[in-house]
Image: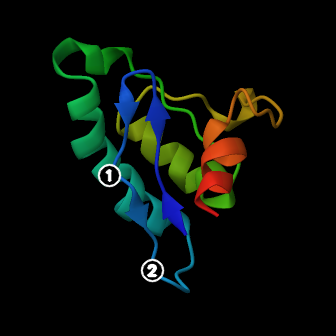
Amino acid sequence: MFVAGVCSRGKTAIRFVKPGAKISSEYYIQHVLEPLFRNDNRKLFPGELINKVVFHHDSAPAHSSGITQEWLRNSGIKFIPKDHWMGNSPDLAPMDFFVNGLFK
């Protein structure tokens, strides 16, 4: 399993999940979100551009958990909260509908 992101300015690093790892909220925050916002986003959106980023992810349990949503709020990261997520759509989730299939 892997985690990656895409946006209009490029792609994030691919982070591989250890086989058998349970993707809890804590694992997701520590191994995905913290490195993403510390490293990838700063490279993709240098300087003041970082203030324009709005983070969006899907409804996987680790993404939609109260712990993750609270961490995002407390980190000052602009994000689309889970109660505003739209239904499944290839247009809204290219990673799920294209990239994952390509890797498989």
**Mark 1 or 2, nearer chain start:** 2
Looking at the image, is 60 positioned above or below residue 84? Answer: below
Image point (52%, 81%), residue name: 21
Residue 1 numbered mark, or none? none
Of 96 and 58, which appears nearest the observer?
96
Q: Residues within 10 Å of mark 1 (few under 14, many from 20)?
A: few
Q: Residue furthest right?
A: 87
Looking at the image, is 77 positioned above or below residue 66? Answer: above
Residue 62 location, x and y as percent? Answer: 60, 59
- Do we see residue 65 in this rendering? no
Q: Secondary structure at mark 2?
A: loop
Image point (46%, 72%), residue name: 17
Looking at the image, is 23 positioned above or below residue 82? Answer: below
Name the residue that disc number 1 marks. Answer: 34
What color scheme is it? Answer: rainbow
Q: Quadrant of residue 9?
A: top left
Residue type at tag 2: Lys
Q: Distance between the Cα atoms at labels 1 and 2?
A: 17 Å
Point out the image quarter for the N terminus. Answer: bottom right
Point out the image quarter for the C terminus. Answer: bottom right
- Do we see residue 64 in this rendering? yes
Residue type at tag 1: Glu
Image point (68%, 47%), residue name: 96
Q: How many marks?
A: 2
Of 7 and 48, which appears nearest the observer?
7
Residue 67 location, x and y as percent? Answer: 54, 55
Image point (46%, 28%), residue name: 7
In the picture, measured across the screen, residue 19 lies left or right of residue 92, that is: left
Q: Residues within 10 Å of mark 2 (few under 14, many from 20)?
A: few
Residue 26 location, x and y as percent? Answer: 46, 66
Residue 18 numbered mark, or none? 2
